[in-house]
Structure formats: C-alpha cells, structure tokens
Amino acid sequence: MNDLARRAETPQSPPFVSVRSISKSYGGAQALRSASLSVFRGQVHGLVGANGAGKSTLIRILAGLTQPDGGDILVEGKRVVADSPHVANKLGMSFIHQELAFVPGMTVLENIMLGIPKKTRFGVVDWGAIAKDVAPIAARVGVRAPLDANARGLSTAENWLVNIARALVLKARLIVMDEPTAALSAVEAERLLSIIRDLRRSGVAVLYVSHRLDEILELCEGVTVFRDGRSVAELAGPDLTRPAMVEAIVGAAVETPVIRTNPRSLSERALSVRDLARAPRVKGVSFDLRKGEVLGLGGLVGAGRTELARLLFGVDRPQEGSMTLEGKPYAPRSPSDAVRSGVGLVPEERRVEGLILSKSLAFNVSLANLQSIILHQALPFISGSRRKALAERAIRSLAIKVPSAETSVGRLSGGNQQKVVIARWLASRPKVLILDEPTRGVDVGARAEIHRLIRHLAADGMAVLVISSEPEELPDMCDRALVMREGRIVGELAGEELTRQRLIAASYASAVERTEA
Amino acid sequence: MSGLSISLRRLSPSAKAALSVFARYATILGLGAMIVVFSILSPEAFPTFNNFINVLNQASLAMIIAGGLTLAVVVGELDLSIGYAASLHGVLVTGLIVHDKLPVALAFAIVLALGALVGIVNGVIVTKLRVNSVIATLGVGTIIVGLAFAYSAGVPIVAGVPEEFLQLALGRWLFGIPNPIIVMALVMAALWVLVERTAVGQEIQAVGGNPIAARLAGIGVDRIKILGFIISGVCAALTGTLLASRLGSGTTSAADSYLLTAFAAVFLGSATLRDGEFHVLGTFIGTLIIVFGFNGLNIFGAPTFSQYVFQGAILIVAVALSSLGRMLAES
C-alpha cells in the first residue's frame, strides 16, 4: 500500500471538511463541549468514542439535522452553515446512518435515485438512461442485485452498498458512515472494507465511525477520539495503536469479565425447546437452557436467530415443535403471554422495538413492572414513590447517564437507551431473559458493564439467552454457546472450547460442508 | 422535512424554549384572553355566574364525547363514528322509553352497553381485520346512520317523553348545579385518573407512543386499542342520551356536529401543556375554548355562517398548534 505516500501529500491541500470547537447541548445535557476534527480527500478518517461521547451529535450537525450552539464548520477552507440535509448534500457530504433508510416497495434503482433530480425525456422520467448511468457505479461498489429488483429483498450488507452507490451518484466528496459493519457478518464486512479502500483511491474522503477498533486500525490513516463531548486525541502514524485508542476512549482501565461457571453443575432446566420450526428461517431447533446459565447463540447474520427468539417470546407462533418452561408446557400466543409466563426479551432494534422514545426513563422502565408499582392489587393506581424508586434503582444499578428519571429516553445515547431496555427486565425478574444483540453500537466501557450485568443476573438464578453477531462477545460472557446456521443448530461450544476462533470456525465449517454436500 | 421545521431548528435554544413555552400555554392564554375580551365587550351578559354555569352546561355534552375520543387518539387511532353513534343512541334511548315503555334507568343502561358494543366493533375491525381506523370508523358510523333511520324512519320521537327522562339533563340534583356538569366532571376526572394514574393508563400511553415496543414489553396492544374504542363509544352514548334528554326528543343527526367539535377540542388539547401529545386535561381546556367561543359569538349575535367559519378555523389552528408542539419537541 502507498499509505505513506498519501500521508506525505495531504498537508499541502486543506482538509475537505474541518470542524472547529463545536459545542451543542440538548436540554440540560451537554452532548458536545469542544469537538474538532478534520478529514482529508482520499483518506479514511476514524471517529471513535464511547456511547454518549458525542459522535452521533457531530454527525447530525454535519448532516444539517441539528444546529451547533457554537464553533465552525469549514469545507475546503471556507466557513459554511449546513442548516438542512439538502445544503449538506450540496456541499458534497453524504451520510449513511446506522439505521438505514430505504423504501421497501421501490426498486434498487429508485432507491438509489430517491430525491435526486432525474433525467427526463419529454417530461417523463427516463429510467432507461438513468439505469445506464447508474449501472457502472452500482457495479463498482459491488451491488449484485439487479437494479430493477425490489429493495425489500436486500440484505443489510447490500443495503449499505446501495447507499454508497447513492452517495456516489450524488457526487459526494465526503461519505460519513456510522457503524457500517455492526450488522454485517465477517465476510460481508471484509467486502465492504475493500470497497471503502477503493473509494479512497478515487479521492473520496470517508469519515468512518465504528466501535470495531480492528477495522479502524486496518482502514484509517488518522483517528479522532471523542470522550464526553470533547476530542481528546488525534492519532496517526506510529501513534495509532489499539492500546492508545482504548486508553483515550475509556480514560480509565476496563475491568475484565467474570469467570465462567461450569454448565455441567447446573442441572435444572429453565427452558427446553424441541424441534421448533417456522418457515422459512427456523428449521427444527432443539436445546435446553438451564437456570443460572448464560447461553450464547452465535452464527452469521440471517441464520435465523432473531426469528428463533421471536418464537420463544410468542411474537410468532411455531409451525412445528414444542417448548417447556420449568417443566410445564409453554406455547405463548403473544408477547404478553410470554411475559406472564416469565420470559423477557431485549429486542434487536432498541429505538424501534424497545423504547417509547417520547416517554421518560421512569415510564419505559416501569412498562413491564406495572404490577409492582401499583398501590394494591385491587387498587391499580400508580404509586408515584414506587415508580420513582424503581427508576432510581435502575439508574443506580446500571449506571445510566441521565439528568433525571423524567428525561425522555429519545434524548439518551445508544448505550444508555439499551440500559433502559435491560432495566425494564431487571425489576420484573423473568425466569428466562432473551437478549438480541445487547451491545450492538455500544462502546467498550458500557459493553463491559452490560456483560457484567448479564453474568450477575445468571448468578442470581436467571436463565439467559444471548444472541450476538460479534465473535468476541459470546466467549466473553457465556457459559456455553450454540452456533446456528440456516435455521438449524450446527454446533455447541462450552468451557475451554468456547473461543472466538472456534465460534467462527463452527459457523463457517458447517457452511462449507453444506455447500459440498 | 417541512420548511417550518427547518426554520425552527435554526432558532437559538433560548428562542426555542420560549416558543415551546408559548406553544404549551398559547391555548390557555387564548382562553383567558377570550374571557377578558368578552367580559369587556359585554359586561352585563357575559361575565355572570349564570352565564358561566350556562356555558359549562353547554360544554358538558361536547366535553364528554371529546373526553372519550381522547382515549381513542391516545392509543393512536381515530374514531369518526362518535357523532353518528351519539345521534343513534339518542334516538334509541328515547324510543326505548317512549315506545317500549322501559324504565329510564334500564333504557339508559342498555344504550351505554350498546355504546360499548360499537366500540368493540370498531376496535375489532381495526385490530383484527387491520383496517385503518379512519376508514373503519367512517364505515361503522355510516352503518349507524342507516340503523338510526331504520329505527325511527327519520321521524323524531317527540311525543310522550316522560318528565323523568327530561330531568336527566335538565335537573339540578346536586347543589343546584345542572346535572350534565356533574356527569361531565365525574367522567373527565375518571378518564384523567385512568390515563395518568393507573397501570392500564400506562399501557394506554405506551401503545400510543410505540405499539411495537409496547407489544414486546408484554402489553396486549389489541386489547388496549379495543379498550380505547370502547371508552370512546360509551362516552358517545352518554352524550347522545343527555342530548336527547335536553332536547326532549330523539332526533336522527342531532349529535352529528359533535364529531367536529370533539376533534377540534382534542387537537387543541394536545397543544396544551404538552408538546403535541393527547391528554385528558388538554381536551378539557380545548373544549372550554370552543364552547366559550361559540357562547361569545351567540351573545354578540354573530350570524350563523360565522359559527361554521369559527369551527372550521379552530380545527385547523388546533391541529397546526399540535404539530408545532411535536416539531419543537423533536428539533
């Protein structure tokens, strides 16, 4: 690679975009205090930091979605005011957010061209000519789906590619990517990274926001670290190392997770699943989950894990198979059925599925605990003091950063929002708790806290099932892990076998077998 | 992204806070200003105890139906059947008493039960058949118009209405206060406690805020939505009954116009004290604004057309204020 050559060349030209001492507060919370960073053309610049460090706020400001209270934004050396997404686009900035926006009913091409002025013939949109222009761009970024395919069928990975194609059609000179690989499998992520390298070669600047430090090291020339709304470190060249980044992100050492309990010593079954199936994603799954155990469910994205969780929680009903909960038949017809039986779920998409964003922390935490905060069984009135106590216990035991229990959760950072969803189930003490991607988009510090919390719940006798796509996560906190692939459980790892390498090997080895068969 | 919401974001935080306070209290200020202006312009007729009791009495029927509608909108649905349903229930309760010679209390109970039934029908169509609530309740409302005509052949039931039934709305059983005011106060207090202070109320608010998250938190979303429609239906029946008693007759389409009043009140209410969120206390204030406005127009002998203009305009202003509140909350 000619990384060194590129670094030598950049100082001569001004950065494409430069942010100077930006500050921003929401209500009482100071999201950004004094944040600065610069991104040069033809470079991938990393932005890392804990949840709540101010990364998302900075992106929103660049995108024209919110206005800073102070500080300057310079594009090619000139001061600009990006006060709407439209202006930001005109300045040559494109944004691909964590939660991808697309219109499911439209074709891939229509999604790429959404809101972009189109070529017309006699006043009618000339899709043929547009397709001719877009096709090479789509091919370049590796969109494999035909342009006229319905976007509904696209995987998350392909959606990213479609969004990158869109940015190129918009002639973006800076593409900001927020956690691009969070929902991707290892293979998909590798493909995306090589496409980003390709973009860099063509002179596009990329601001790359991620919690995956290995990717950052592999990809970025320079890195800015945010902590508590400030840019606390600029790392490049020989200074850009993993320990340096972690030190800057955390500001203090992160504790190592707890020691694994021996699953063999836990005999009492909490949940037994036999031959559970629902087409097309779950094709006959059997396993036992024991009391006091943290059971991981690994595998590639799309293996059917979320769909399995939906069956366990009564969101969907199985077509075949059966379940027992503490020895009794368990066939939930709805989530409320599942909750009554003593099963809880922390869903994958916390903003969409987990929280009522306009409501307060106290409201959201109390939702699954209404019976515990009423005055009396016969008097179903909410007790203000019990509600407050419940919320404050949650804030304390999960170290949630929030001005008050009555702050609406829409204003919290991702990690804190996730803690609120988990807090809901802490108080109601279900027999079985299912967590779907509990630390997605959560920073190193908060992740360790969440892991510790999950271990703690299991130590208290809860049976915990954790779904995770991050290979490091399951060995960190699980007693035992199952690997799922194409709707079936294809492997089980426990004790010393449960390592990152073995997990990955298990999910891919079976894939090879299947393709050979 | 609308132009207004972008210009809102350009405002400084202090200007935004000021605007937010203004938006929250604008309706209450409006109500106060209206009372002051009417009092100055008509010092003999308007600011009297009797006129205030009179206005409250008039407001009561609209208030009850709007209070019920609030529950439907809080769970995230619209109920367009309430006006027609109230009319039908008015005809029905009169008919049951006059033609079928049922005791007033029994007829009253039957009609309230039917109100609940209309709510169940609305709720089941919306939650189980997944029909958009605007369409579902418009359809049910139209069917109800048909039923009212079938029952009465379009002829008002006037003759033979017993005094006992008339006393329901015209009587002053407690402290000389007209009965509708008492009923309204009880209904609104009960609805407020239900939504703001009970466990079910928390579920109702959760379903309105994010039905997906509410479902995954273990709340029976369909059950809660049906409950919202039931309360809306029962309140419509109550308003219909009181109206028939006040008019002394069962007349098809007598209560139809309450639909618009109720919607205006509910949306004005959502812009009151909160940022575009529907709530019972807001609906209370919203209804007062509308009824005081009508009362003022009446006292000054404003022509009939101006009342329609007032009602249409206030509906639009109400919804605009409500979305302004939401935009402020989000920006």
Image: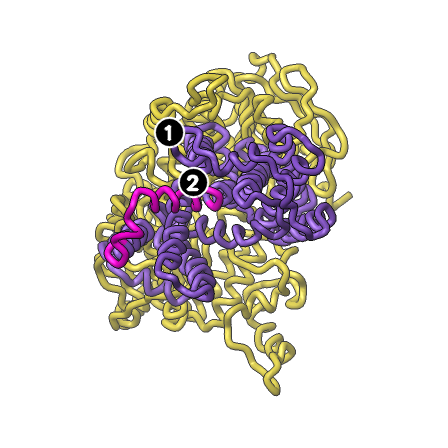
Which chain does the yellow colour mark? Answer: A
Mark 1 vs mark 2, foreground winner is: 1
Q: How many C-alpha atoms fall within 10 Å of the one at disc 2: few (<14), some, or many (≥20)?
A: many
Relative to residue B291, is residue A35 drawn left or right?
left
Residue assigned mark 2: B280
Considering the image in quadrants, where does the C terminus of chain B appear? bottom left
Q: Amino acid at mark 2?
A: Val
Q: Which residues are magenta?
A: B39-62
Where does the image place residue A356, in percent across and percent down from the top left?
46, 41
Which chain does the purple colour mark? Answer: B
Per the rendering, the mark at residue B175 is 1
Magenta stretch holds residue B44: yes
Q: Main secondary structure of the magenta part?
A: helix
The correct choice, above or below, for A286 with respect to A355 in the image is: above
Q: In terms of image quadrants, where is residue B316?
A: bottom left
- The answer to whether residue B22 is seen in the rendering is no
